[in-house]
Amino acid sequence: MKVICTQENFKKAIYNCERAIAKRNTLPILNNILIEADKGGLKLSATNLEIGVTSQIGAKVEKTGRITVPARIIGSFSASLMNNGENIELEADSEVLKIKTKTNKTSIKGIPADDFPLIPFKKEENLLSLSSLFFKKAVSKVIVAAAINEARQELTGVNVKFSLEGLCLAATDSFRLTEYKLKLDSKNISKDKYGEFLEKTNSVIIPVNTLLEVSRIISDESEEKLEISIEDGQIFFETDGVKLVSRLIDGKYPQYEYIMPENYKTRIVGEKKVLQNALKTAGIFSSGGSHEITLKIDDSVKKIFVRSSSAETGENVTELKFDITGPSLEVVFNVKYLLDGINVAATDQVAILFNNETTPAAIKEINEKSGEVLNDFIYIAMPIKN
Amino acid sequence: MKVICTQENFKKAIYNCERAIAKRNTLPILNNILIEADKGGLKLSATNLEIGVTSQIGAKVEKTGRITVPARIIGSFSASLMNNGENIELEADSEVLKIKTKTNKTSIKGIPADDFPLIPFKKEENLLSLSSLFFKKAVSKVIVAAAINEARQELTGVNVKFSLEGLCLAATDSFRLTEYKLKLDSKNISKDKYGEFLEKTNSVIIPVNTLLEVSRIISDESEEKLEISIEDGQIFFETDGVKLVSRLIDGKYPQYEYIMPENYKTRIVGEKKVLQNALKTAGIFSSGGSHEITLKIDDSVKKIFVRSSSAETGENVTELKFDITGPSLEVVFNVKYLLDGINVAATDQVAILFNNETTPAAIKEINEKSGEVLNDFIYIAMPIKN
C-alpha cells in the first residue's frame, strides 16, 4: 500500500472511526483501525461487532493494499496533524504502517488485515434521506429518556416509527418519555422502495450508542444529507463519505401512545431559564431516593410555587410568575426527570401541561413569535403519587 | 443574625470559602461555612485546619449573630443566585439559616457556631504587597515541578526566598526544577518591618494547595494588590476583602542553586507550538516507564531531530528547523518532564540550553521583540543517562 492524502482528511477519517472501538475487547484486532487503499481511494474502518464505521476519503493511490493499526496509537498520532493543507504519505506492508509528513516520519506496528471482521454493507439503494442536522437535533431531544439499565433491552434504544409524513422518534425508561416528530420531504424518499418498506416494517429500535455515534459524525455545520437504509435487521447510515452500520434491537417497543394524554386541563407557560433555576434550587432540598419536589399551581394568586424540603438539609420555595390556564393543582415530581425535560426543550419559553396530580404531565416548546404550543416535541413526566 | 447584602457579593464570598473545606472531614463542623454578622459587615469563613479563608463583604447588618451551614448545601444554593443587582436577606438563629430573595425562601439546617475552630489572624502590619495577577502568574509557572508524593514533605511545597529585590519562587520533585523571580516595587514593602524580617527569615516553604487556593481567589481581571505577611510559622494572604491563612511547611528546602548551570554551551531556539507538537507525537512512541525520547541537535545539517521508539508500538522522528548555537549534542529525556516545562513557558518562542548529555538542560522564555533569552523564568530538566 502507498497512498497520499491531506492531513486534514486523514485526521477526520480517524476521528470518525475511533469511537467504534469497544472499550473492552478480547479480540486484539478489534482495537485496531483497518486502513485500505484501493482504486476508490483510502478507506478507514473500525468495528466493535455492534457498530461498524467506514470513512472514505479522497487519496492518490500509488499502490493498493491494507493493514490494521492500533486505534489508540494512530488516534494519538493523528491528533498532532495540522489542518494546514499539507499532505501525508502512508506506506504499508502487512505488518508496519509508515507515515511521512514534511517534518515527521513514523512507523506503527500493525496486525495483518486478513483477520479483520467483515463490516456488513448495504445491498440495495437508499430508503430515504433527510437533513443530517435535523436528525442530530431529533436524537439530542429524545435520548435523555432512554433506559440505561439493560433489564429491558428494548428500552435502551430509541424507537423510530416510519410513515410517509416522517420519522417519529421516542424513548422511555418507564419513568418519563420523549417523542419527537421529524418531517420528511417526499422528494427525499425512494418512493417505491419506501412504500414497500412501510408495508413490512414501520418501527425499529436503534441502540442509543449508535445514535450517539451518528450524531458525533455529523459536524455542527454539516449541510449534507443523511441517507438511511434498513436491511436484514441492520440499519445503515451514510453522510459525507462516512458509512455506519449497526444492529437493531430485537423486541417489541411498548405502545407508549396510550399513556400520552390527548387533552390537558391545566397549562403553565414561562421562561425556561427561570424554571430551570427554580428546579435546580429545589433539587438541593429534595427528599428521598426519588428526589421529590412539589409544583403548586395556584390560580387564585396567579403564581406557581416550586417547593422542596428534607429532614436533613432544610427547605425551599420559589415563586414563579408564569401564565396559568385552567384549574389549580399540586403535583409531586422527581426533580431530575422534570429538569431533564426542561433542559432538552430548545425554546426560551416552555409549557407544562397537566390533567391532575396522578396522570402524566407534558413539557412542550413554545413558538417564540406566536406564543403557541409546539407539538413536534413532547416530554412526558410521571408524577410521584403520595 | 439579620443581614442584607447583594446576591453577587454573597455568591462570591461562598465561592472564596468553598474550597477550603477538606474532602474527608471527621469533624462535621469542618464541612460547614461559618457565617458571621457584626458591626463590620458580613464575614464568611471556612477551614480545613491547614488553610483558613475568610471573605468579608459589605452588608446592612440589622442584627449581629453567627451560624455555620454545610458548604455543600449553601454552595449549591448560591450557584442559583443571579448577578442581577438584587439583594438577599439572611436571618439566623443558632441552628437554622433563613435566606430570602424576591422570589425564593430557603431554610438551611446548620450547626451552632460555637464549635467552629478559630482561624488564626495576623497580629502585625503587612510585610509586603504586590500585584495579585503577577503573583498568580508566578505560581502557575512553578507549581508544575512540585512533588506530589509526600515522602519528602518539603518538596510538596513551593520554596519562596525573600530579598529586597523581590521573591524567588522555586519547586522541584528532584527530576525537574522551576524557578521564577518576581520583582518587588520598594514602595510596596513595609521597609523597617521587611528589613527586620529579612534578618531572621529569608526562605519559607508554602504548600502547593495553599498557592492554588490563593490563585483561585484572585480573579483573572484582578487589579488588587496581594498583601503578604508571615508570623509564627504561618503565612497570611489578603486581597480584595479575602483573607487566607496557611501553615508553612517545616523543613529545609534543598539548595537547588548548585545544580543550575551558570553557562551553557549549546542553545536551541524555536517556536513553542512546533516543539510541543513534536514532543507530544514522540510521547506516543516513548519507551519504558521513564517515557524516553531523544533530542538530537545536529549543527552540521542545522536541524533538530525529536526521536522515540518502542518495541510494542513503533517509532517516530520529527525534524525541527530551530536556531542552533554551539556544538551538536544528543540528549535523552523523560518526555513528560520536558513537555511540562515547554507548556508553562509563556512566550511564542522558547529556548533550551544544554552543556552535555548528562547535565541539566534549561528551558527559558524568549523576548518576543528583541529575541533575547529571558531570565526571570527557568525550568530545569534532568536528562536520562544511558
Image: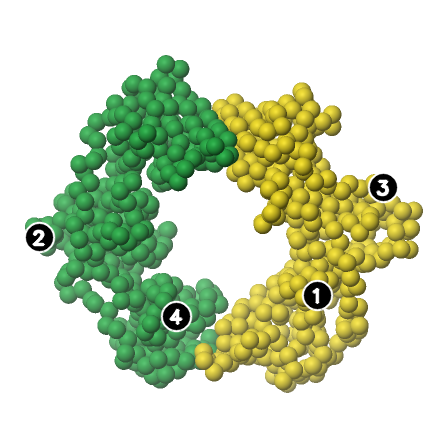
Chain colours: A green, B yellow
Read off the residue under disc 4.
A71
Secondary-structure class at tag 3: loop
Q: Are marks 2 and 4 on the same chain?
A: yes
Q: Nearer the viewer, residue B221 or A256?
A: A256
Quadrant (top left/top right/bottom left/bottom right) for the C terminus of chain A: top left
**Mark 2 against mark 3, which lies toward the viewer?**
3
Pick the front one: A60 or B73: B73
Q: Quadrant of residue A169?
A: top left
From the viewer's perspective, tell me whether residue A179 is left or right of residue A91. left
The chain to which mark 4 is attached is A
**Residue at 21% over, 31% down:** A261
Gap between marks 3 and 4, in whole Å? 61 Å
In the image, which is nearer the foreground, mark 1 or mark 2? Answer: 1
| Point 26% across, 63% down: residue | A50
Q: CA distance from mark 2 to mark 3?
A: 87 Å
Kindly identify the amino acid type of the residue bearing the numbered disc 4. Answer: Ala
Residue A335 coordinates in the image, percent (x, y) = 39, 36
Query: Dot 1 falls on which chain?
Result: B
Q: Which mark is residue B152?
A: 1
Is residue B38 visible in the rendered structure shown here? yes
Which mark is drawn over residue B124? 3
| Residues at discs 3 and 1 both on one chain | yes
Residue B18: tell me if it is visible.
no
Residues at marks 4 and 1, CA–CA distance in whole angstroms: 40 Å
The answer to whether dots 2 and 3 both sit on one chain is no
> Upstream in the sequence, badge 3 or badge 1?
3
Residue extending furthest top? A300
Query: Disc 3: which chain?
Result: B
